[in-house]
Amino acid sequence: MDKKFESYLRFVWAGISKQVQTGAIIPSQKFLVDKMIAPIPASYRGTIVELGAGTGALTIRLARRCPEAKIVACEINPELARDLRQNLRRAGINGEVEVVSEPAEKLLPRLRSKAAEKPKYIVSGIPLGNVPRKNTLALIEQIKRSLADDGMYIQFQYSLLDRAKIRAAFPRLRTAHVLLNFPPAFIYFASKGGHSTTVRPPARASRPGSLRR
């Protein structure tokens, strides 16, 4: 069986057996990936952190778009992380991407303690809607603290359930709907804007009935 197809099947199985962790049963498609990475200049030479990298649907396109950037791709599932490394090698992307298999909540503080400069872009496919409320707020706070003041946090989701949580931390927030992805998805483009504040839990809102995970 083709190795790439095997990797695809493992992602599908992870999406079924570990749906809370994976959040999807198929990798993100080109329409979604292209829109997510569009704000990142091809000439960017700094660090980009990708959270929830899966088997590399976005990672590979990002590495090709920004060949001079340092990409740290975080995937908590060790099997998907192994497939990600193999897919990167098959794509001829060797040494340009650091793959780590640990929770984002541990990776981000570690990067802050080591890096001379904070990353200007943090891209995430972590399924926030599957994460407990307090964990989601803690993760968003870690992302905010790890991001450069003029940076951008790019997050995709299949619903708008966590929009208020992100807006509570990032004053500047733009939402885009990608209808051509399957299933249709939303992308949040978030920037810090004004002065830095701590994430506070937003008031609970009624949950929309459409586009559930």
Image (cartoon, rainbow, N blue to C red):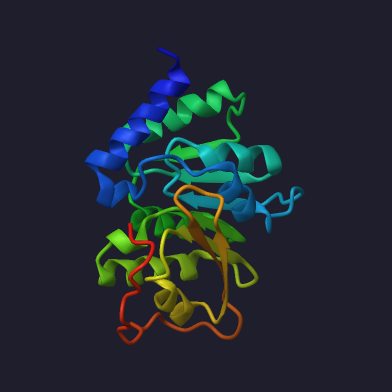
In the image, 193 versus 10, the foreground residue is 10
Give the image quarter of residue 70: top right
Q: Residue at x 45, y 15 (%)?
A: 2
Q: Which residue is most to the top?
A: 1
Q: Residue furthest right?
A: 43
Percent of width and height locating residue 11 = 36, 35
Q: Position of residue 172 (x, y in %)?
A: 59, 78
Q: In terms of image quadrants, where is residue 81?
A: top left
Q: How many marks?
A: 0
Q: Position of residue 55 (x, y in %)?
A: 44, 35
Residue 155 appears in the figure: no
In this rendering, the answer to whether 191 lies above or below 122 is: below
Q: Say whether residue 185 is left or right of residue 149.
A: left
Q: Nearer the viewer, residue 46 or 164?
A: 164
Q: Residue 20: x percent and y percent?
A: 26, 52
Q: Please tell me whether residue 181 is drawn above or below residue 92 in the rendered image.
A: below
Task: Identify whether 124 is placed above or below 94.
Answer: below
Q: Is residue 155 left or right of residue 9?
A: right
Q: Residue at x 48, y 70 (%)?
A: 144
Give the residue at x 34% y 35%: 12
Q: Is residue 70 left or right of residue 20?
A: right
Quarter occupied by the N terminus? top left
At x 33%, y 87%, the residue is 203
Residue 118 visible within the image: yes
Quadrant, the C terminus: bottom left
